[in-house]
Amino acid sequence: MLHDWYVDLSRPLLNLLGHNRAQVVHRLEMVSGDLTGRQIAQLAEVPVVRASRVLAGLAEIGLVDARDVGQARIYRLNRAHVL
């Protein structure tokens, strides 16, 4: 029996996080080092302000590690996170 709804599991990260968050996480997956928010925004092709908000939220849930270095905030994907 088919239902009017279905679960699309072809892009789980996109479905769980939404487009901008998934773009940021996907780009961080491709990098092994630390990046600034501006660098991540450029790689993810999202505005810097939006990337900053996304990164703050991802850091809050532990998916991204963030630390201050001088005047810059540096981010790295937390590869030990359950997602």
Image (spheres, helix red, strand yellow):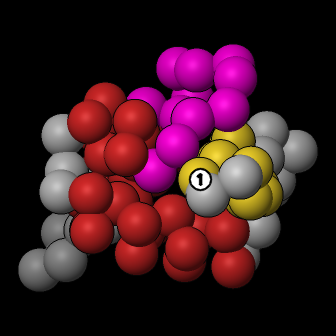
> Residue under circle 1?
72
| Residue 7 pos. (x, y %) | 33, 64
Residue extending farthest right: 80
26 shown above or below 60? above
User: What residue is rendered at 69% in x and 79% in y?
Assistant: 60
67 shown above or below 77? below
At label 1, the amino acid type is: Ala
User: What residue is rendered at 67% in x and 32% in y?
Assistant: 34
| Residue 78 pos. (x, y %) | 78, 47
Which quarter of the figure is the N terminus placed in?
bottom left
Left/right placement of residue 58 relative to residue 69 reads left
| Residue 72 pos. (x, y %) | 59, 53
Q: Is residue 33 visible?
A: yes
Residue toward you, 11 or 68: 68
Q: Is residue 9 visible?
A: no
Q: Badge 1, how many Cα within 10 Å: few under 14, some, many 20+? A: few
Is 49 inside the magenta-drawn segment?
no
Say which element carries label 1. Answer: strand
20 shown above or below 45? below
Instruction: Specify the segment rendered in magenta.
Output: 27-37
